[in-house]
Amino acid sequence: MHDVVGVGFGPSNLALAIALTEQAGPDRPVTAAFLERQESFGWHRGMLLDDATMQVSFLKDLVTLRDPTSRFSFLCYLKEKGRLVDFINHKTLNPLRVEYHDYLEWAAAQVGDLVRYGHEVIGVRPADTGAGGEIDLVDVLVDTGAGTTVYRARNLVFATGLRPRLPGGVVAGERIWHSGDLLHNLDRLAGDTPTRFVVVGAGQSAAEITARLHEQFTDAEVCAVFSRYGYTPADDSSFANRIFDPAAVDDFYDAPAEVKAQLMGYHGNTNYAVVDGDLIAELYRRSYQERVLGRTRLHMLNVTRLAAATAHGTGVRLVLETLTTGERHTLDADILICATGYDPVDPTTLLGELGDRCERDSQGRLRVHRDYRVATGDSLRCGIYLQGGTEHSHGISSSLLSNGAVRSAEILASIAARRDIAHPAAARV
């Protein structure tokens, strides 16, 4: 029995677990268990390229915007690792991605007592129903690999991450990869010597993968396919970055629907399908250098889309369409990598009959209160909170690292307040 059961344990629910650990001496601390299907903590391991840097400041770590004195800060991590002075001398706000992942693992290890790894949530059902049909508690059904067990909860916090998206009609396999599996699949190539890679996509991951393959496979061609004339630079300017401020969530949440659409349109280039300017310049430098030297391996197939892809025993046959003319041609490659983004996971797929009690707007999206709690009406009194999938209600930062520390604090405060109103005399569990 727990006040909170967290479904998924990536950075968002890790920040919540830390906030729970650091509760400031409440009479009845909020209790929790977090369930993660992976066997250990991991966050986009397939894209932990050695030279890739974070796109967000280290000051927007798991805790600092909530509590700058927390022992779980990135600076405390650096101090413990003996790199604090070296990092300061580095004069950067953006650590290496592998370093930040190590920070997340370091923090996760300190709250390991709250996490059950190798536990996959397979469903949720009502635990009890009052005379009027009210549901205060739910049972979370969990596959542990050795059978099914049940966790009872007063609140659920979903942080189930994102599902890889592939172009229509394209199926992942030995020769067709999603970008999230890049490093895992490269490891499997051992001994194989591809002569042509094709990378589809125009965002940061696509550009990073293009640069990595071009550098690592010195005898192979790398073809970058995207529908634009060129990569779009990410807008990380100081004023534009205010869209990620905690206060911007209030502004966005209270705005009319047409203003929300305008804001997402204005500032999509801070986060979606954009590339770091230095990386764009580096790829252009390589492309131009190859033209000068007369040996071209890096091909930028712009204003082009992937129309079809069929894998066969030794490679992939692609059908590419030039957008300006509609002309199609085939291209054979050893490997196709789709850096085509992700889709949010709908938590109601796990809620069973409880999903019917979750309210939706006119576009079929979940209605979510300012405290990230799904609107359910009076009959479902167990709180269902979302860390992700709330861009339509809370703005761009709703699932990003930028606001994770503050978001977790708001969710915890909501859970504690609602528990104390509903169960003022509840025994400590």
Image: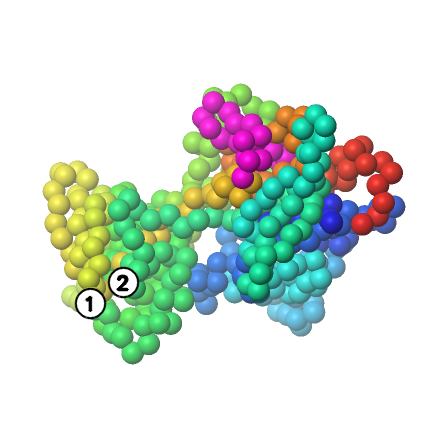
Q: Give, as a single range, the part of the protein colored magenta.
A: 352-374
Q: Nearer the viewer, residue 429 or 75?
A: 429
Give residue 81's position: percent from left, percent from top: 66, 71
**What residue sits 54% from the left and 50% below the top?**
122
**What residue sits 63% from the left and 56% below the top?**
149
In the displayed orientation, state which residue is furthest to the bottom. 191
| Magenta-colored stretch includes residue 286 | no
**What residue sits 87% from the left and 38% below the top?**
425
Q: Is residue 204 above or below residue 367?
A: below
Q: Which secondary structure type mostly characterizes the magenta part of the structure? A: loop
Give residue 342's position: percent from left, percent from top: 42, 47
Q: Quadrant of residue 110?
A: bottom right
Classify residue 47 as left or right of residue 401: left
Classify residue 121 as left or right of residue 411: left
Residue 179 visible to the viewer? yes
Image disc number at residue 314: 1
Residue on which disc 2 sits: 175
Q: Nearer the viewer, residue 280 or 269?
A: 269
Classify residue 332 as left or right of residue 426: left
In the displayed orientation, state which residue is furthest to the front. 131
Give residue 151's position: percent from left, percent from top: 67, 51
